[in-house]
Image (tube, rainbow, N blue to C red):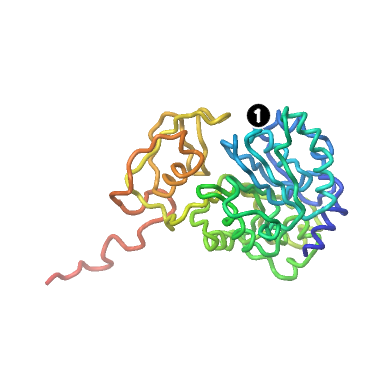
Amino acid sequence: MHSEVKTYYGQTLQSSADLQTSACCTATPPPEHLQRILCRLHPEVLSRYYGCGLIAPEALDGCQVLDLGCGAGRDAYCLSALVGEQGGVTGIDMTPEQLAVARRHQQFHAEAFGHGRSNLRFIEGEIEYLDSLGLAAEQFDVLVSNCVINLVPDKTRVLREAWRVLKAGGELYFSDVYADRRVPAELAADPELYGECLAGALYWGDFLRLAKAAGFADPRLVEDRPIQLNNPQIAARIGHIRFFSATYRLFKLEALESACEDYGQAVIYKGGILHHSQMFVLDKHHRIESGKVFPVCGNTYRMLKESRFAAHFEFIGDFATHYGLFEGCGSAIPFDSQVAGQAAACC
């Protein structure tokens, strides 16, 4: 399948116009500050974009970022403008034709963004074998990936390698395609369906289990959308499965709890994150307004306090007292609150 994917993205596809479905397309326009960056990218780089979401997390200035499956470099170049000269971006891809496009425009983008030096490098290789590429443990602050992990047969190894190369408190922030059920083996072996980011898509429940097994105990869904299969021939073959584009953030924090536990904690967002001065969006259920006391569970408290976001928050409370499950976070006590039938007899 590695060979099939290389052929599909290196030779079959010459631009995003050659895609047969919208699975590898970003449906919504990026925010204004990212549009300004994208307008400065080389046209050839933009034409070879096959992503399904936005992978520009907040507060990247000075960070070391690794782009898993960087392709022709569209996201990597955008991120290089966000990390600044004190940060750096490493792009990994296994397709020589895609990397050739990315590499021949490095000087163009260094000049476009006013960098005195290039803060970006590209490496040819497979994203599940970062160890063989010489990438050390705890080397990166942030990992990103845009509609690529679904193309990798060994997704377990990708997640384990992501955990290894992330610094403590770092995060894997990525968009990908997910299915509402497991894709049958005969469809998973279809090269066109695989190349279109459908046949390799994980059943969302399997993804959550794999992420937790790799160490990412509390995956956070940032945004999602259904994918429409507008190609009639492809829809006839795999249209009985519903597919979704979704962005997750996975924090590398040891001993996160398996549920949202209440310790009476809260945070106050002080602002200060560029382009997010009024509100910080951690995930789909945590939209934190500036200056407002915002109650949080223990895991959310740690995600903010033990990461690059800590300087932008005030933290209220500690872990001294436990109050049970945090209300409204998708979990509930499993026991009935009343005795079924007649009242229980007492001695």
**Does 154 sit above or below residue 123?**
below
Q: Position of residue 7 (x, y in %)?
A: 85, 58
Quadrant where the C terminus sits is bottom left
Residue at image coords 71%, 56%: 133
Quadrant where the N terminus sits is bottom right
123 relative to 203 in the view: left or right: right
Q: Badge 1, how many Cα within 10 Å: few under 14, some, many 20+?
A: few
Q: Position of residue 180 (x, y in %)?
A: 62, 59
161 relative to 38 in the view: left or right: left
Q: Position of residue 151 (x, y in %)?
A: 72, 58
Q: Which residue is mark 1?
A: 33
**Does 271 sit above or below residue 320?**
above
Check disc 1 and give the amino acid type: His
Please identify the quarter of the rendering in which residue 34 is found. top right
How many circles with numbers are drawn on the protein?
A: 1
Q: Position of residue 25 (x, y in %)?
A: 73, 45
Residue at image coords 70%, 53%: 148
Please identify the quarter of the rendering in which residue 270 is found. top left
**Does 219 sit above or below residue 2?**
above
